[in-house]
Image (cartoon, rainbow, N blue to C red):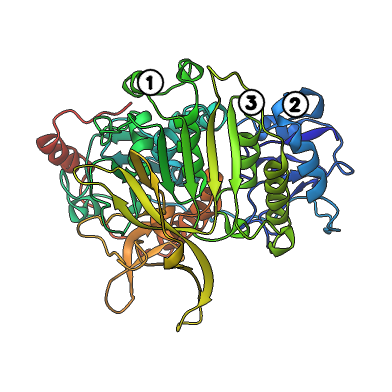
Amino acid sequence: MPHVITQACCADASCVHACPVNCIHPTPDEPDFATAEMLYIDPVSCVDCGACVGACPVGAIMPHTALAPEQQDFLGINEALTGTGRPARPQARVPTLVRLGPTRTTLRVAVVGAGPAALYAADELLRQPGVEVTVFDRLPVPHGLARYGVAPDHTSTRAVADLFTAIEDQPGFTYRLGVHVGEDVTAEELAAHHHAVVYATGAGTDRPLDIPGADLPGSTSATQVVGWYNDHPDHADAHVPLDHERAVIVGNGNVALDVARILATDPERLADTSIARHALEALRGSRVREVVVLGRRGPEHAAFTLPELVGLAARDDIELLIDAPGGIDPAAATTRQGRLTMEHLVRIADRPPHDAPEDAPRRRIILRFRTAPLEVTGSSRAEGLRVARTELATGADGRVHAVPCPDSAETIAAGLVLGSVGYRGVEVPGVPFDPETSTIPHRGGRVLDGGGGSELPGLYVVGWIKRGPRGFIGSNKTCARETVNALLADANEGRLPTPGPAARFEELLRSRRPAPATV
């Protein structure tokens, strides 16, 4: 096999379009692209040209001869994912970018948010002549979850910042950082001074752990801990107690595994990463030696991805254990990648214990399935988590739910309890918002009003605040293309509002924020 995709894959699909022989799958026009955890390279079709290596924004592709020992599993994964008999195409189809027609004035677009979705949208817009894009963000540093949400030891994923730098260097691109839309300037003021406004505010907060005791000190969210060790301004001062030998994380997505891995890693292994200095010093004094990661359902419903599991299982300094009452049945998975994940879990569960000296036992992570949280226990702080085993039952709504079995309740002693049950978007004052989905209502990227569902001229949405917190960093490229096409089509048809003078907005902004950062 000439080239292999590894766990750093972000489903960006740049490699797909660079490949001259269409050997990278699934492509964006194939039905399983939207749900694939990673792409793969067909070893029979690959001609070893290396075009995909340069196209990958996170360095996820390499020759099979260059794989590190901990990456060898990806040889088997790529081989297992091939052989589907996919029809050969010259390359994947992507939506054609609408061309902006001749204009008498520069098209001024404001983008609210500075994460991957925002920058992909800016990139698509700046491909047109006569377009200026100003990106606003309330934080002093751009790149959103690509900066503050990626674990510090995932250095290859953080390399996507190089792509963002190339976007930022284009003529017509400007940052206004440290400007909070909805407070420093209103949504109405922003719209009044731009032809269009694209909201790309993401899903920056977490869904709460809705059980008794969740508000006790020591019970918080994995999102807050991620922000703490990534030096997010909102979470840099968070209190993360590490004075107990055990921590418990409720939820088993990639964020949960990231946090578990950081808590279980020898701090000196993190010293040369981008981890916040205050977090590194706290981890150096940590007593945590075991992290339990809970999933309400069985292994077939695990929320983490196969690449994340493979990376964690390859760590020789962390003991990874599986607690799956009822067993692990690969046939219960509904996708090929799901079956591969289950097969890896079986192999991990069957591994013999690793010998370690008694005076230096390995830290460990336990993936515990079919377990539901009932209550955070403790008087003045979190001292444990009361849990119960679960079984699946069909509710009155016809949906299958994981139902706790009360007679199986037990308490897991822990000094730190973290909820990791998903992200949600936050409302921007003056912009329509659906509290049920925590998204901005839209039709093809055009923002809809909150009443009759009519389109609001000049307002658009992209990214997680558009479609909910799902997909990878690169998934925002297709999303951005749809939204930008809608904006450009409206511009060509004369449907965009006529804005006030740019100089007047600059005066307004300086009166509210005398020195907004531009980078």
Structural crowding at the residue carrying mark 3, measured as other residues with C-alpha within 10 Å and reported as few (<14), some (14–19) or many (≥20):
few
Q: Residue at x 62, y 22 (%)?
A: 356
Measured in 3D between alpha carbons, the distance from the residue under mark 1 to the one under mark 2, in whole angstroms, is 29 Å
Q: Residue at x 62, y 41 (%)?
A: 309
**Upstream in the sequence, badge 1 or badge 3?**
1
Element at label 1:
helix
Q: Which of pointers 2 and 3 indicates the residue nearer the eye?
A: 3
**Upstream in the sequence, badge 2 or badge 3?**
2
Element at label 3:
loop
According to the image, label 1 marks what residue? 280
Q: Which of pointers 1 and 3 indicates the residue nearer the eye?
A: 3
Q: Residue at x 71, y 59 (%)?
A: 329
Task: Locate residue 459: give its quadrant.
Answer: bottom left
According to the image, label 2 marks what residue? 67
Which amino acid type is shown beneath numbered disc 1?
A: Leu
Q: With 203 as the anchor, is 193 left or right in this view?
A: left
- Contact, mark 2 vs mark 3 (Cβ under 8 Å): no
According to the image, label 3 marks what residue? 316
Q: Is residue 65 above or below residue 180?
A: above
494 or 327: which is nearer to us?
Answer: 327
Q: With 488 as the anchor, is 57 left or right in this view?
A: right
Locate the C terminus and report the quarter of the image it occupies: top left
Could you tell me residue 468's position as x and y percent?
A: 43, 58
Element at label 2:
loop
Could you tell me residue 453's position as x and y percent?
A: 33, 76
Task: Locate residue 4: give its quadrant.
Answer: top right
Q: With 377 as the anchor, is 357 left or right in this view?
A: right
